[in-house]
Image (cartoon, rainbow, N blue to C red):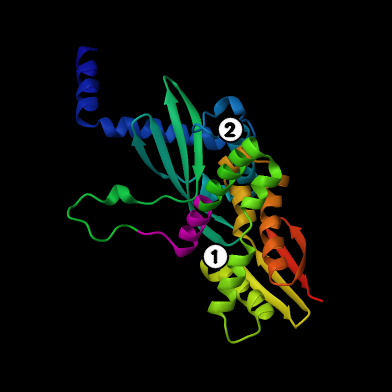
Amino acid sequence: MIISTVLTLLFIFLFPGLLICQDEVNIWEDFTKRLKNGEITVDDIKPYQGLNSETLLGFLDGIRSNVDWVEMEIEPEYHIIEKKIHFLVPLTFEAQGVTYNFSFVREKEKWYFHHLETITIRLDRVNEFPVEKFPDISENQKQSMREETRWSREVYLYNSHKQNNGREYALNLLKDGYGFLLAAKTWVPLVPPHKAFILYMCWHQENLRGNDITLEKLTDNEAVVREKSVYLTLYKVSAHLRHQINYEEYLEIYQTIWKDRAEKAGWKIDFEINDVQCVFRFVRE
């Protein structure tokens, strides 16, 4: 008995990582089993400050409904950072592979789901100095980060001005139609201004903002632009935006900006929005 205890203590001292590893594997196995069976509840979630458990549970339900469980149940790469455990799991949705970071916090003998993220910048690999090149991510991910940062701040400012000065005042501050038209006229000078506006809109939204754009029609009096919108996608995938603003107001911000831009360029605009797709229909008298 004494020999067994001594050997166990010696094993723990020499190979602590093996025991920790098994502990983390058990957390992942327990989580995936309960997720697959629909047993995760809001009581199992302790999110970052500013996020809410209901939103994260909705994301997990989306994973449960669409994931390839063969991918999900493979033992993942994991990292223990203070009281948090991060599992990096390559998953495929709609033929696109993305590495998800499932984060947990551990309190005594119980684990809690903490966060779900699709962007993990591997700056943990920066350990030799001086450093001139840093680990990078895809251009699509960087575009998404830029837009998330931008619109999170715009929503914050909108909410602040709305609270202090009213909704109309807050919406008016978002309007930039004259500036957008000036950019179109000066940077696309070789076509008439009303067409320059439509063409610049497409270029701007695709090349600067990372949206998928199709210009379906352009005449002197009519234009049709189809956009897979990063702005609309952000509301689906960013937990904090849902916590800050309801969808109707979020959509009103988007429409207010484009109505003002179109009006300043002499166009009237209608929107057809379906999930993250938006069709802009422009008419000019």
Q: Quadrant of residue 284?
A: bottom right
In this view, the residue farthest toward the right is 285
Local packing at callout 2 (Cα closer than 10 Å; few below 14, some 14-19, many 20+) is: some
Q: Are marks 1 and 2 in contact (CB under 8 Å)?
A: no
The amino acid marked with disc number 2 is: Asn
From the top left corner, tell me how far across and down residue 131 is, in percent: 21, 56
Disc number for residue 52: 2
Local packing at callout 1 (Cα closer than 10 Å; few below 14, some 14-19, many 20+) is: many
The amino acid marked with disc number 1 is: Gly
Q: Nearer the viewer, residue 56 or 233?
A: 233
Disc number for residue 210: 1
Q: Quadrant of residue 12?
A: top left
Camera-near label (1 vs 2) is 1
Q: Is residue 158 visible?
A: yes
User: Marks 1 and 2, how far apart in space?
Assistant: 28 Å
Quadrant holding the N terminus: top left
From the top left corner, tell me how far across and down residue 101 is, in percent: 46, 45
* Span colored in magenta: 136-149
- Give the residue at x 52% y 67%: 208
